């Protein structure tokens, strides 16, 4: 099996970053030059794109995870930080309205999950649980809490 065929096989199962493909090729025993040629061919044909992988990761994590969690996942896959930032900004510009809607859904979910009627009247123990929940998912918990409080105060 050639390196190119191996990469086709891998990409038929799931998306891989160029860095992950390089590692997989090295583990399989292919030469560095052969790996780079195969990756270039696959990218030229549009079968592999780090930009598309980042965009898909952002889309699948929307409303569930924050920027830092998605960025950490992408960095683990060998995606450059500046590429992630560029795609994040593009996605943010395209989905400005849906972002606000997703954050509103997250707020509603948190309020249901922790049985919160008003953000201003939350006991410290529950507030800590909510902040941990948000932080674990990569959101800036304190910033979101402040934003929710100001939204509630404005009503």
Image (spheres, rainbow, N blue to C red):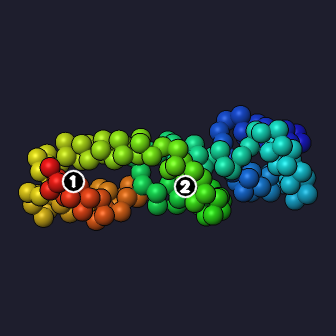
Residue 119: give its label. none
- In the rendered image, residue 23, in percent from the top left (x then y), is placed at 74, 57
Q: Would residue 8 appear left or right of 15 to someone viewing this image?
A: right
- In the rendered image, residue 17, in percent from the top left (x then y), is placed at 69, 51
Q: Residue at x 85, y 53 (%)?
A: 35
Q: Residue at x 77, y 55 (%)?
A: 22
Seen in the picture, residue 85 relative to 104 is either above or below; the reply is below
For label 2, the crowd category at 10 Å Cα-Cα, with few meaning under 14, some 14 to 19 and many 20 or more, is few
Q: Would residue 148 appear left or right of 64 to someone viewing this image?
A: left
Seen in the picture, residue 134 relative to 116 is either above or below; the reply is below
Do labels 2 and 1 touch, CB within 8 Å?
Answer: no
Does the image show residue 31? no
Q: Nearer the viewer, residue 133 or 144?
A: 144
Q: Can you identify the residue that label 1 sits on?
A: 151
Image quarter where the N terminus lies is top right
Residue 89: give its label. 2
Q: Nearer the viewer, residue 39 or 80?
A: 80
């Amino acid at each position: 099996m050639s390196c190119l065929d191996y990469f086709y096989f891998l990409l038929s199962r799931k998306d891989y970053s160029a860095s992950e493909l390089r590692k997989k090729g090295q583990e399989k025993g292919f030469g560095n030059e052969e790996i780079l040629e195969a990756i270039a061919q696959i990218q030229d044909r549009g079968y592999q794109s780090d930009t598309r992988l980042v965009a898909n990761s952002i889309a699948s994590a929307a409303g569930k995870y924050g920027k830092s969690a998605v960025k950490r996942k992408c960095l683990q896959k060998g995606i450059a930080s500046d590429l992630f930032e560029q795609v994040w900004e593009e996605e943010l510009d395209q989905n400005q309205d849906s972002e606000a809607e997703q954050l509103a859904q997250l707020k509603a979910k948190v309020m249901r999950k922790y049985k919160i009627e008003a953000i201003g009247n939350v006991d410290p123990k529950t507030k800590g649980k909510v902040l941990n929940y948000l932080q674990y998912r990569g959101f800036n918990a304190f910033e979101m809490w402040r934003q929710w409080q100001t939204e509630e105060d404005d009503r």
